[in-house]
């Protein structure tokens, strides 16, 4: 019907006369608004930047919500015809451009040196976008006096389907090369203190933290929230029944999946971890069950690694209750501050 660009499409709606489709799509970390004639044609950009959603189309006016890292959702109105955090890129595995967001602390002074904290997003099919959030808000992290880097490596949405799919059966492969490239690039910034760098992530981001601290000691502190630690034991425990089929090539008893689960499981490198690590896990998490965090914590304690575990008995995969969120942020920031 119409030419479809290589975008991750979100919401869509029709114009009142039924002749135009308006849709949102993720592209390079922002959720933009596009239009295309129902009869066919090439989509045209209407509005861009931040996270655009909830589009309502009038005869001559569009109303939508837009949020960004620097602001919660607000209502916007523009003509139907169309009408700031800065994304950066660096070369990743195979020469692919890897985008990352850089968020600086308040009253930033480029002549000074700042600790750096890298935030790794979950999914892994997801992204760090220019959107407001009460959870894992990079602005709140930067307000602690740190430079924050939020990369979009292999598996991230908004950079074409091939980029998304290249993490499948390769959880610790090209994506880690992408992340290493960003780590190196940021550490060379004149205001970045390469001797005071930390790393944090949740879900797949927690997996990435678990994997990375088992392969390098470059980070002074780590936080892993609901992270996958033992892929082999989680394969038949997660609520995501399709998990091993898509991510690791088949049911866990298949030869392909068995090889991938063993190859990419962080628990096989636990003996190499030396980074002080805060482990957070939730008893009502059926996606990454609570034992994943407890296994990591046990390994850390057995190896004499400075570590602390926090278990929320009343939270699922995310910490959503306000008192718990307050405790989470205080604990996470306090742990990082202790080592940076």
Image (spheres, rainbow, N blue to C red):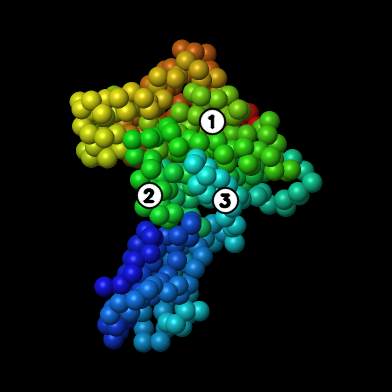
Compute the Cα span from label 1 to label 2.
30 Å
Residue 217 or residue 286, whichever sits in front: 217
- Sequence-earlier tag: 1 or 2: 2
For mark 3, does the 10 Å Cα neighbourhood hold few (<14), some (14 to 19), or many (20 or more) residues?
some
- Residue 336's spot in the image, x, y percent? 59, 33
Residue 61 placed where, x, y %? 42, 83
At 58% across and 24% down in the image, what residue appears?
A: 217
Residue corresponding to mark 2: 162
Q: Can residue 65 be seen in this view?
A: yes
- Give the label on residue 152, or none: none
Secondary element at tag 2: helix
Frontmost residue, 115 versus 244: 244
Q: In screen coordinates, is 329 left or right of 65?
A: right
Residue with the most extreme right position? 111
Q: Residue at x 27, y 25 (%)?
A: 258
State the image quarter where residue 242 is shown.
top left
Query: How many neighbours does mark 2 have within 10 angstroms: few (below 14), some (14-19), or many (20 or more)?
Result: few
């Amino acid at each position: 019907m119409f030419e479809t660009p290589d975008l991750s499409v979100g919401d869509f709606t029709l114009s009142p006369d039924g002749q135009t489709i308006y849709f949102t799509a993720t592209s390079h970390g922002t959720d933009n608004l596009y239009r295309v004639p129902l009869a066919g044609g090439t989509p045209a950009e209407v509005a861009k930047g931040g996270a655009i959603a909830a589009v309502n189309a009038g005869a001559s006016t569009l109303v939508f919500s837009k949020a960004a890292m620097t602001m919660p959702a607000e209502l916007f109105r523009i003509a139907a015809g169309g009408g700031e955090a800065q994304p950066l890129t660096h070369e990743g595995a195979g020469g692919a451009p890897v985008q990352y967001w850089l968020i600086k602390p308040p009253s930033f002074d480029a002549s000074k040196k700042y600790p750096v904290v890298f935030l790794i997003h979950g999914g892994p099919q997801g992204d760090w976008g220019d959107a407001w959030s009460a959870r894992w808000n990079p602005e709140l992290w930067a307000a602690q006096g740190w430079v924050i880097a939020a990369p979009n490596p292999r598996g991230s949405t908004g950079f074409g389907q091939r980029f998304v799919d290249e993490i499948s059966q390769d959880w610790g492969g090209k994506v880690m090369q992408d992340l290493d490239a960003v780590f190196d690039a940021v550490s060379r910034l004149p205001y970045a203190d390469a001797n005071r760098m930390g790393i944090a992530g949740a879900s797949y981001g927690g997996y990435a933290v678990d994997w990375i601290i088992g392969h390098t000691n470059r980070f002074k502190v780590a936080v892993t929230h609901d992270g996958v630690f033992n892929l082999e034991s989680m394969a038949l425990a997660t609520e995501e029944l399709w998990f091993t089929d898509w991510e690791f090539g088949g049911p866990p008893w298949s030869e392909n999946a068995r090889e991938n689960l063993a190859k990419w499981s962080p628990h096989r490198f636990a003996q190499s971890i030396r980074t002080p690590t805060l482990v957070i896990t939730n008893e009502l998490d059926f996606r990454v069950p609570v034992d994943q965090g407890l296994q990591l914590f046990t390994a850390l304690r057995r190896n004499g690694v400075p570590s602390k575990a926090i278990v929320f008995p009343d939270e699922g995969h995310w910490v959503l209750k306000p008192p718990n969120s307050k405790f989470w942020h205080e604990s996470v920031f306090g742990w990082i501050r202790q080592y940076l």
